[in-house]
Image (tube, grey):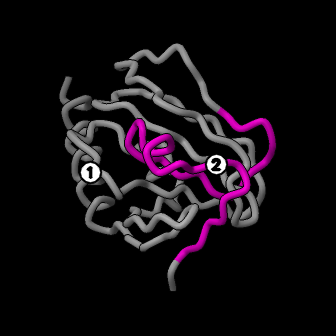
């Protein structure tokens, strides 16, 4: 029991440290500007937006990969729906819209049909509202 308690405390402390190490950037996707939190480390990618209370419009999380990958995403411990925008070489190649939260035991896994090097999570409905489409340009502001 004591080991479990120590593990939980360490994990909680680590999650606070990681949140404080977050990097934010402005991006443009399909002519729409939004502020995103960058997920580069494996732990940041695993945690993603899980357990967040809300995701404001015109904000999101950008998952950055050093190579082309077929990443798996799920809606574990999410509190709101998401749209996922799959990006390769600064172009939208696919979208997954209005993915619903699935609690602690998700049944659905989402992945693109082709390798990508960026994945953008935005609030559910964002893709339709902003008319994001395949081929739209993706730019990260310097």
Coordinates of residue 93 in the picture (x, y in percent) = 73, 49
Quadrant for the N terminus, please. Answer: top left
Question: Which label sits on residue 130?
Answer: none
> What whole-number distance in Å separates the C-alpha atoms at marks 1 and 2?
21 Å
Q: How dense is the environment of label 2, judged by Cα within 10 Å: few (below 14), some, or many (20 and up)?
A: some
Q: How many marks?
A: 2
| Camera-side residue of 47 and 92 | 92
On screen, residue 43 versus residue 110, left or right, reads left
Q: Is label 2 in a helix, a strand or a loop?
A: loop
Of 72 and 124, which appears nearest the observer?
A: 124
The image shows residue 103, relative to residue 110, as above or below, that is: above
For marks 1 and 2 on the same chain, the one whose residue lies earlier in the sequence: 1
Identify the residue under disc 1.
56
**Dot 1: what SS?**
loop
How packed mark 1 is, by other alpha carbons closer than 10 Å (few <14, some 14-19, many 20 or more), is few
Query: Whole-percent x and y of residue 3?
Result: 25, 31
Residue 136 lies, with reference to residue 56, above or below; the image says below
The magenta span reads 111-140
Q: Position of residue 138 (x, y in %)?
A: 62, 66
Seen at 47% across and 27% down, the residue is 99
Residue at left 66%, top 65%? 137
The residue at 74%/57% (across/down) is 88
Residue at left offset 40%, top offset 65%: 34
In the displayed structure, 119 sits above or below 18; it is: above
Left or right: 124 in relation to 16: right
Residue 6 vs residue 109, the one in the foreground: 109
Q: Is 5 displayed left or right of 113 in the figure?
A: left
Q: Quadrant of residue 59?
A: bottom left
Residue position for label 2: 133
Q: Nearer the viewer, mark 1 or mark 2?
A: 2
Does residue 110 belong to the magenta stretch? no
């Amino acid at each position: 029991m004591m080991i479990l308690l120590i593990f939980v405390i360490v994990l909680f402390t680590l999650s606070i440290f990681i949140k404080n190490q977050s990097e934010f950037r402005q991006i443009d996707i399909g002519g729409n500007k939004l502020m995103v939190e960058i997920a580069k480390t494996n732990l940041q990618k695993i945690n993603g937006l899980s357990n967040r209370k809300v995701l404001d419009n015109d904000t999101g999380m950008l998952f950055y990969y050093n190579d082309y990958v077929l990443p798996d995403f799920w809606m574990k411990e999410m509190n709101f729906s998401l749209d996922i925008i799959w990006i390769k070489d600064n172009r939208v190649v696919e979208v997954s819209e209005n993915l619903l939260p699935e609690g602690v035991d998700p049944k659905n896994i989402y992945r693109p049909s082709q390798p990508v090097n960026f994945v953008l999570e935005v609030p559910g409905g964002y893709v339709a509202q902003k008319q994001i489409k395949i081929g739209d340009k993706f730019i990260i502001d310097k």
